[in-house]
Image (cartoon, grey):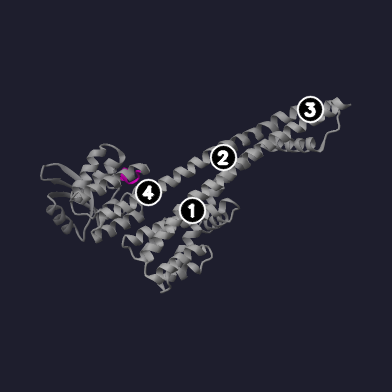
Amino acid sequence: MPSYSYSGIDAKGKTTNGFLQADSIQVLEQKLKESGIWMMKATQDSKTVVSSKTETTQQSRVKVKRWELINFYIQFSLLLRAGINLPKALRRLSDDLGESRLGKVLQTIAEQVEIGVPLNEAISYFPRIFPPETVSIIRAGEVSGNLPNVLDEIRLHLEWTDKLTSDIRQALIYPCIVITAATGLILFLFPFTVPKFVTLLNELALELPALTQYVMIISDFLKSYLLIILTVLFLIPVLYKIIRKTKKGGIFIDRMMMNLPIFGNLIQMFGFSRFSKNLSMLYRSGIPILKGLQITQSVMGNLAIREAVTATRKAVEEGTPLSQGLARIDIFPKILVTMIATGEESGSLDESLNSVAGYYDEIIPRKIKALFTFFEPVVMLTLIGIVGAVALSVILPILQLWSV
């Protein structure tokens, strides 16, 4: 269906602009007239439906904070449950939020809903705020007449994501500070401080212990190649981004990350958690499993798991049960496959998907806590070991001098 950007005047004489899909320009004019808008100008351009209006173009690139979205979904659901119709609820929320980013976006969405555009279509023009899975879930809620419950589903998912992100950030703060301090100390000690002691020890013509010799070798290496090392450290993330942009490179990197010792298992869990969470939320909202897999595939950040979901979707299209399609791919864990198979056999796939998502809700925070409980002392002991080795490399020759 063609898309049009239009300009018109409403019953109060106020100029209004927007975008709308219609079979023809005549149908568009009729739709606007039924909404109380006299069309003055319309332009058909499916590629510039949003960009035809500068303000709307800017809004389409807007990204808001997760807590703002959580509050929006809470209030939106409450207003709908209170019996307020969709356009009025959106207007009230946009008025409450005023000139904020989300407030302006909701104002645009409210204008579209008031002239007959479905909510899922109106929000789809703002993908950075309402991603594809959200659009599909809201579409299902509109069709089923269960929009308030669907909004609660989305809100719970966002709250879980927000809590998990907060836990990870909190767990990472201390190790990151220690690693940064350790790296800075190494780059300061070996190239700049150790050489001064080396000069002094050489002047004393002492027989140097093995530890001191090793420290001197490392010091000379870092001093000679410091600029090259810093350049390589800078280029690693740049090369990582370049390689990850290619399909094969991205899949290779994500597979390699998932096989890392210690951290690999946690990376896998994050990927499977997102897969099960999204698919569970979509399926419970009334979206068929094939469509759910297609949407889940498109939003997976882990390219290796995305490829696996794509292969699973193709198998399901051919008539293979979901659990068997997952079992064919070595990337999915047995517990996930078993739980989904149980749901298919008992006719309660929605509950099984929800159980899988709940399992990862429970296990991931525990894994994070256990990992960083182990990781923090290892980092500290490594730092102490480096400083101790440097100190001993200087003290041991001095002790030899005293014993002479």
The three-letter code of the residue at mark 3 reads: Thr
- Give how far across and how far down residue 139 sits, in percent: 28, 58
Is there a contact, CB below 8 Å, between mark 4 and mark 3? Answer: no
Q: Nearer the viewer, mark 3 or mark 2?
A: 2
Distance from label 3 to label 1 (Cα)?
A: 55 Å
Residue under label 2, please give it: 175
- The picture quadrant where one finds residue 9 is top left
| Residue 391 higher or lower than 23, as above or below | above
Q: Quadrant of the C terminus?
A: top right
The three-letter code of the residue at mark 4 reads Leu
Magenta stretch contains residue 123: no
Residue 397 visible from this viewpoint: yes
Residue at image mark 3: 199
Tag shown at residue 158 = 4
Give how far across and how far down residue 338 sits, in percent.
47, 66
* Alpha carbon distance from label 4 to label 3: 60 Å
Residue at (53%, 55%) from the top-left corner?
254
* Disc 1 versus disc 4: nearer the observer: 1
Badge 2: residue crowd in 10 Å (few <14, some 14–19, many ≥20): some
Q: Of tags 4 and 3, which is closer to the observer?
A: 4
Q: Earlier in the sequence, mark 1 or mark 4?
A: 4
